[in-house]
Image (spheres, grey):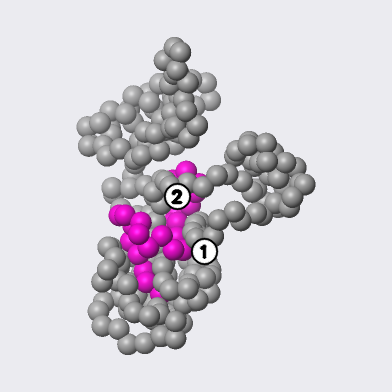
């Protein structure tokens, strides 16, 4: 699974400014980094009224993808999917995905960003899995960094989440209806060998090393999926 770490803190604590420095440093070391930012604001529009994408969305068509020579933009409805699932779906080719916000995300390492003039208090004692703090005032504990320690923060992220291990080799990930399913070694190896065995018998796939398989099961006769109801299985 793609490693995910999220940075959170009070409004105007300097998260974005810090993250830009940290991400530039990590990218300079040859890693591909994706970022997911959350917001409490609703009804944000990035396409102008009257534009083609606006008209498609106004007709209830989602998602809508705009492909330009310099960028690809996807317009879609909101999502309550876990941060790890969003990272897996949206950034399959990244070495690391960094979230901005998502302080309540379960099972995700978190780094608190706290600036004395805006941070009412530290949130780390009230949240789970806070692994580090970036601050401009004195804080006790391990993994405490200053705002100019972006190289040290990059070192920490690289050591903890980017250093390859034997467990990362030949990883098999199973998502069913958007939810990751834990696999023991027997099932993982069985799925891997079975799928790759079939794939490698096909033309031009003899040397396949990475496979993404999506299975969509047809609905029983007389029943259709209700809007928003998941019906995809992703391997």
Q: What stretch is highlighted in magenta?
A: 86-113
Q: Where is residue 230 in the image (x, y as percent from the top left)?
A: 43, 32
On the question of residue 206 being in view, the answer is no
Query: Going by the image, does 233 lie left or right of 18?
Result: left
User: Which label sits in the foreground, 1 or 2?
Assistant: 2
Q: Residue 27 carries which label?
A: 1
The structure residue drawn at horizontal position 26% and vertical position 37%, both measured from the top left corner, is: 183
Which image quarter: residue 123?
Answer: bottom left
Looking at this view, is 65 or 42 the one in front? Answer: 42
The structure residue drawn at horizontal position 66% and vertical position 41%, both measured from the top left corner, is: 57
Q: Which mark is residue 208?
A: none
Establish if 183 lies above or below 160: above
Establish if 114 lies above or below 36: below
Q: Let me know if residue 62 is in the magenta part.
A: no
What is the spatial separation of the Cα atoms under label 1 and label 2, in whole angstroms?
Answer: 17 Å
Which image quarter: residue 187?
Answer: top left
Query: Going by the image, does 111 lie left or right of 61?
Result: left
Q: Where is residue 77 in the image (x, y as percent from the top left)?
A: 55, 44
Which is nearer the N-term, disc 1 or disc 2?
A: 1
Q: Could you say whether the residue bearing mark 2 is in a helix, strand or loop?
A: helix
Instruction: Give the residue furthest to the right.
Output: 50
Q: How crowded is mark 1: few (under 14 residues within 10 Å), some or many (20 or more)?
A: few
The structure residue drawn at horizontal position 53% and vertical position 74%, both measured from the top left corner, is: 17
Looking at this view, is 115 or 24 the one in front? Answer: 115
Q: Where is residue 33 in the image (x, y as percent from the top left)?
A: 49, 58
Q: How crowded is mark 2: few (under 14 residues within 10 Å), some or many (20 or more)?
A: many
Label 2 belongs to which residue? Answer: 87
The structure residue drawn at horizontal position 43% and vertical position 21%, both measured from the top left corner, is: 217
Q: Are marks 1 and 2 in contact (CB under 8 Å)?
A: no
């Amino acid at each position: 699974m793609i490693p995910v770490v999220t940075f959170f803190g009070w409004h105007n604590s300097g998260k974005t400014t810090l993250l830009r420095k940290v991400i530039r440093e990590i990218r300079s070391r040859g890693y591909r980094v994706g970022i997911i930012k959350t917001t409490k604001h609703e009804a944000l529009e990035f396409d102008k009224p009257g534009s083609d994408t606006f008209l498609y969305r106004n007709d209830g068509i989602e998602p809508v993808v705009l492909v330009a020579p310099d960028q690809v933009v996807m317009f879609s409805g909101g999502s309550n999917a876990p941060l790890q699932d969003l990272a897996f779906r949206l950034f399959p080719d990244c070495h690391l995905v960094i979230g901005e916000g998502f302080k309540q995300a379960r099972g995700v390492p978190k780094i608190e960003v706290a600036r004395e003039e805006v941070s009412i208090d530290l949130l780390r004692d009230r949240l789970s899995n806070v692994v580090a703090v970036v601050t401009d005032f004195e804080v006790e504990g391990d993994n405490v960094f200053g705002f100019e320690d972006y190289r040290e923060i990059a070192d920490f992220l690289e050591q903890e989440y980017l250093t390859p291990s034997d467990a990362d080799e030949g990883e098999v990930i199973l998502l069913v209806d958007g939810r990751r399913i834990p696999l023991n070694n027997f099932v993982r190896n069985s799925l891997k060998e079975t799928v790759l065995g079939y794939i490698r018998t096909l033309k031009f796939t003899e040397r396949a090393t990475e496979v993404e398989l999506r299975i969509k099961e047809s609905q029983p006769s007389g029943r259709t999926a209700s809007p928003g109801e998941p019906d995809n299985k992703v391997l």
